[in-house]
Image (spheres, rainbow, N blue to C red):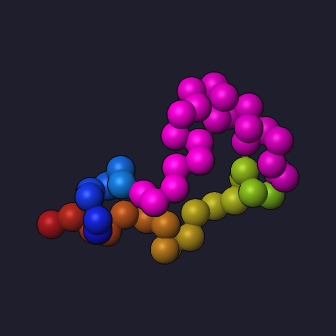
Amino acid sequence: MKNGDSSADVKPIAHLYKTQDYALARELPKDICIAQPTADTYSMAQE
């Protein structure tokens, strides 16, 4: 990791409010919005 969990090279929607985020998501195809997460999107197990 570079600088922690919130670090990223590009944050195209970081400035949006949550309501704007949801409005943007409603414009996406439904299969993207209702897709179940895959194993590679889960956080690493904490011990």
- Looking at the picture, does residue 32 appear above or below residue 18? below
Number of numbered callouts drawn = 0
Q: Is residue 17 left or right of residue 1?
A: right
Q: Position of residue 6 (x, y in %)?
A: 35, 50
Q: Position of residue 9 (x, y in %)?
A: 46, 60
Question: Residue at 68% across / 34% down in the picture?
Answer: 22
| Quarter-of-image position of residue 25 | top right
Q: Is residue 36 magenta?
A: no
Q: Between residue 9 and residue 5, name the one nearer to us.
A: 9
Question: Residue at 80% across / 58% down in the picture?
Answer: 31
Q: Between residue 10 and residue 35, name the one nearer to us.
A: 10
Q: Position of residue 24 (x, y in %)?
A: 74, 38
Question: Residue at 29% across / 68% down in the picture?
Answer: 1
User: Which residue extends farthest left?
Assistant: 47
Q: Between residue 18 and residue 43, name the one nearer to us.
A: 18
Question: Which residues make up the magenta segment?
Answer: 8-30
- Looking at the picture, does residue 47 appear above or below residue 11? below
Question: Residue at 58% across / 31% down in the picture?
Answer: 16
